[in-house]
């Protein structure tokens, strides 16, 4: 292929107002800040922050408090989904060629200019890719956004941070569907990703295929099997979407104790994984786990 998918850029988490969501992340995750904090985008009429957590970035986001923001994409998403995980983004090279490959697979795509990009970013239509996907070709002369993970000393900076949950890395991101083959057509056939593992989980109530996306991330394509599970409830309300983020932690009991201290409930757990109550986490489903996906490209 004439393109490559690289490091994961971020996972977007949307709510109605940015400051309370940022405060939640500060209390529960103690992220590294200084990349983008409370940024207003006049293009998108949204406020957002980039929060460094382990090897990854969460982008907290909300429609801005300005007239018309509810008619722009973030505002429309928030009106429909409320508090929810929004999308997944990766760095890439050959962004124009990637656009071509995705479009050739019948996936609708859009860029900020409306044209095929030669650099910068483009976005898929979420109904064509289980959730919205963003691909961004980074150039050294692009001053914004600043991603501290590209700078020397990031690992040491994270190691020196409070990290109260004991996070090692983002383990995987979960999208829910009722058709795993459709998910594989997106990630394997269109994007050239590699299936690395399949299995079921009683604690999450899903049957899943995991795919390696680039050299540093794993996406779980999950089909709900337990009607009472959060995955089934999410799919029942919204259909296909970005459902959960899994975090690898050093010690599950340490993570559980910190979550309890922060008032975050746990709705399911086994010896390796716990699942938080989205009512306490601004609508996001977080999983904390000591399990590693077999075949993870980082191992």
Image: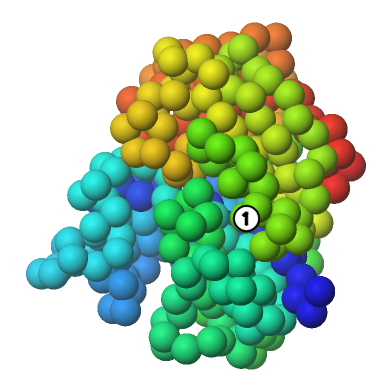
Residue 2 shows in the view: yes
Please determine whether, in this image, residue 50 is positioned above or below residue 220: below
Q: Is residue 43 left or right of residue 127?
A: left
Residue 227 image-quadrant placement: top left
| Residue at the left extreme of this rendering | 67
Where, quadrant-wise, is the N terminus in this rendering? bottom right
Q: Which residue appears at 45% of the width and 76% of the height? A: 110
Q: Residues within 10 Å of mark 1 (few under 14, many from 20)?
A: many
Label 1 sits on a secondary structure element that is helix
Relative horizontal placement of residue 142, taking residue 111 as reference (left or right)? right
Q: Position of residue 236 (x, y in %)?
A: 36, 29
Picture residue at 38% right of the left edge, 61% below the top: 48
Residue lying at 76% horizontally and 30% vertically, measured from the top left = 198
Which quadrant of the figure contains the C terminus?
Answer: top right
In front here: 105 or 134? 105
43 versus 155 height, above or below: below
| Along the viewing direction, whichever of 228 and 35 lies nearer the viewer | 228
Q: How is the image coloured?
A: rainbow
Residue 145 at x, y percent in the picture: 53, 74
Q: Quadrant of residue 291?
A: top right
Q: Is residue 212 left or right of residue 136?
A: right
Q: Position of residue 125 (x, y in %)?
A: 44, 63
- State the residue position of label 1: 186
Total numbered labels: 1
Residue at 78% across / 67% down in the picture? 152
Front in this rendered view, residue 40 or 274: 274
Q: Residue furthest top?
A: 270
| For residue 110, above or below residue 263 | below
Q: Is residue 137 visible?
A: no
Farthest residue in the right direction?
299
């Amino acid at each position: 292929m004439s393109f490559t998918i690289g490091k994961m850029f971020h996972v977007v988490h949307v709510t109605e107002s940015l400051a309370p969501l940022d405060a939640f992340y500060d209390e529960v995750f103690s992220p590294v800040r200084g990349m983008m904090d409370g940024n207003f985008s006049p293009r998108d009429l949204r406020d957002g922050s980039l929060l460094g957590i382990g090897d990854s970035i969460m982008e907290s986001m909300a429609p801005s408090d300005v007239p018309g923001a509810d008619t722009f994409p973030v505002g429309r998403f928030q009106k429909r989904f409320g508090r929810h995980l929004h999308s997944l983004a990766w760095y890439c090279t050959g962004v124009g060629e990637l656009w071509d490959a995705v479009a050739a697979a019948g996936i609708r795509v859009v860029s900020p200019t409306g044209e095929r990009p030669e650099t910068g970013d483009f976005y898929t239509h979420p109904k064509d890719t289980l959730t919205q996907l963003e691909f961004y070709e980074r150039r050294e002369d692009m001053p914004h956004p600043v991603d501290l993970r590209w700078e020397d000393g990031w690992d040491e900076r994270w190691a020196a941070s409070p990290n109260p949950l004991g996070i090692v890395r983002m383990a995987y991101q979960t999208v829910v569907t009722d058709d795993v083959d459709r998910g594989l057509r997106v990630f394997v056939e269109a994007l050239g990703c590699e299936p690395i593992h399949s299995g079921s989980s009683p604690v999450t109530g899903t049957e899943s295929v995991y795919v390696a996306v680039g050299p540093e991330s794993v996406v779980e394509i999950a089909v709900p099997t337990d009607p009472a599970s959060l995955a089934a409830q999410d799919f029942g309300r919204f259909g296909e979407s970005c459902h959960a983020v899994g975090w690898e932690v050093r010690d599950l009991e340490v993570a559980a104790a910190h979550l309890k201290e922060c008032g975050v409930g746990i709705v399911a757990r086994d010896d390796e994984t716990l699942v938080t109550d989205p009512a306490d986490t601004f609508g996001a489903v977080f999983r904390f786990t000591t399990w590693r996906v077999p075949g993870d490209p980082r191992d």
